[in-house]
Amino acid sequence: MTDHHAAAPPSGPVPWDKAFALRLLTDMLRIRRMEEKSAELYGAGKIRGFLHLYIGEEATAVGALHALAPDDNIVATYREHGHALVRGMEMGSIMAEMYGKHEGCARGHGGSMHLFDARTRLYGGNAIVGGGLPLAVGLALASKMQHEQRITACFFGDGAVAEGAFHESLNLAALWKLPVLFCCENNLYGMGTALERSESQTDLCAKAASYNMPALRADGMDIVAVHEASKQALRTLRESAGPVFVEYQTYRFRAHSMFDAELYRQKAEIEEWKTRGPIHTFTARLKAEGKLTEEEFLAIDAAANEEVAAAVAFAEAGTWEPVDDLLKDVMTPPPPAPRPGGGDAGSPPAAAPCEG
Ligand SMILES: Cc1ncc(C[n+]2csc(CCOP(=O)(O)OP(=O)(O)O)c2C)c(N)n1
């Protein structure tokens, strides 16, 4: 039975023991400090290319990923630094990848948008809006065919719901009853386009429900609501043995990427959302409930900053890939078949250009 109005569990007192609560707070702070540093490094020309920050949205990746099993698959977008970190990738390997260094998780070939780590089952980072959705369906199909219990969690933005790949993926996942947790991070904007300017139906749960799958929404600024809703979604997924959709209602505090003058939203709107910032609201809650002292908070924050400093040192000390390796892993098309009746079809290019 599909109920796209299913309410997320109410977020009362923090229902976790202190150790778990601090673990989640720590992960949100690790993401925040890593990304603040990344923005600074971008300004200094150390990180180049595209850089999309997740600042403001940390509760979604942290709350959802901590509900999953360590060997579940993850597929993410170009705004995936936080997902990679919480998944267990070394911060140094993420930072080195953003620097374009050989020691990065993709040997510096991918950069910020293409973090990938088969060991932790983080199947990218994807520059194509909606591009991760069919990959997630394929991964889940493989798990089902191999009789594994594994779930594939697929993170994507609200902008992806306008893509054909979204509809094809939800349709097939529901039709074939595949174990996909569709995690829509609705931050209200796809680049500079507000959701209501690109979607005739802005109720994203209603869209998912039209594919006959359970759908629920959660306050993506509240780590407790995110985590509890994710656990509920996973229970439903196991009971129904098919996909589930969750909309996390969140907001990015920074620009879409480092090239964005932010002319499409008011400063007052950003400030209003900042009052609901996931880190300071959760910190305040834990303190009010006697689960966190100021000294403990400062120690967690200092450790996050130390981890960032070590990651930057690792990236700085990294090496550039030798020029001779430039075309390594670049696919070269086969030579063209001879034309009937002869004639020269011309030489193939040395390497196919990358698109996207
Ligand atoms: C298929 C495709 N179309 C357009 C783009 C250009 N583009 C990059 S990010 C983006 C906005 C996507 O917004 P959303 O999915 O909501 O994710 P968010 O950036 O808000 O996290 C667009 C249109 C792209 N990368 N891929």
Image (cartoon, rainbow, N blue to C red):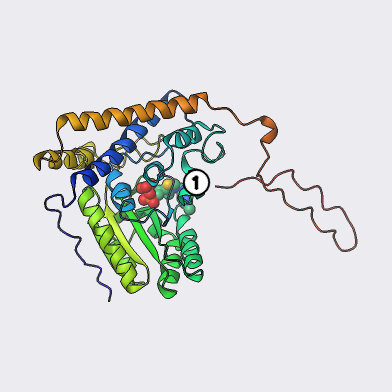
Residue 155 in the image, given as x and y percentages of width and height: 38, 54
Residue 331 in the image, given as x and y percentages of width and height: 68, 48
**Residue 126, visible in the rendered structure:** no
Residue 340 lies in quadrant: bottom right
Task: Identify the residue shown where x is 74% and y is 43%.
Answer: 350
Q: Is residue 258 left or right of residue 246?
A: right
| Quadrant where the N terminus is found in the figure | bottom left
Residue under numbered circle 1: 116
| Picture layout, residue 300 above or below residue 181 | above
Task: Identify the residue shown where x is 40% and y is 66%.
Answer: 179
Residue 111 in the image, given as x and y percentages of width and height: 50, 38
Local SS, label 1: loop
Residue 68 in the image, given as x and y percentages of width and height: 34, 56
| Picture layout, residue 189 above or below residue 9 | above
| Picture layout, residue 156 above or below residue 18 | below
- Amino acid tagged 1: Phe
